[in-house]
Amino acid sequence: MNPFTFIYNKLIGRRKAYRSCFLGEDGKLSQDGELVMNDLLKFCRSTKSTAHMSVGGTICPYATHLAEGRREVLIRIQSMLGVSDLDLRELAQQMAGHSDNQ
C-alpha cells in the first residue's frame, strides 16, 4: 500500500469514528451528539473570547492558552464531523435560549 492510500484510509476511518460518535444515520447530530456538542460549545468557549483576565486586571497567558487549547479540540471535532456552519449556528441559537443549568 502506498503512503497516500494508507493516510487516506486512516483519515476516512477516523472521520467515520467521529461521525459514529456524534451523528445519526441521517448525517445530523444525534440526540447524544447534540447533548455533548452543546456541552463542548460552552466548555470550549466557542462564542466568547479565550482571553482570561487575572485578579490584577491583566491577561493571564496560562489560562488563555488553556482556553485556546480547548477551542482547538472543538474545532478538530467539528472538522472531522463535517457539520455545516448552518448547523452550528442553529445549535448556538438553541443554546442561547437555554441556561447553563439545562
Image (cartoon, rainbow, N blue to C red):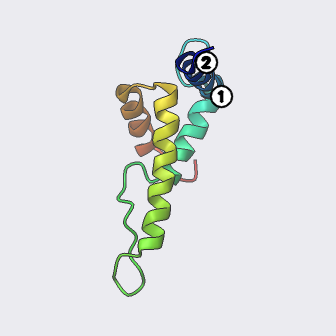
Residue placed most toward the observer, 24 or 75: 75
Tell me where residue 76 appears, x and y as whole percent.
Answer: 49, 39
Tell me where residue 39 appears, x and y as whole percent.
Answer: 56, 46
Q: How many marks?
A: 2
Residue highlighted by disc 2: 24
* Residue 58, label in figure: none
Depth check, mark 1 against mark 2: the one in front is: 1
**What residue appears at the point 46 percent right and 31 percent down from the top-left corner?**
79
Tell me: 32 left or right of 52. Answer: right
**What residue appears at the point 60 percent right and 37 percent down from the top-left corner?**
35
Q: Amino acid at mark 1?
A: Cys
Residue 22 sits in quarter:
top right
Q: Amino acid at mark 2?
A: Gly
| Dot 1: element | helix
Tell me where residue 4 appears, x and y as whole percent.
Answer: 52, 19
**What residue appears at the point 37 percent right and 50 percent down from the top-left corner?**
47
Q: Residues within 10 Å of mark 2 (few under 14, many from 20)?
A: some
In this view, 40 is above or below 89: below
In this view, 96 is above or below 2: below
Residue 19 sits in quarter:
top right
Residue highlighted by disc 1: 21
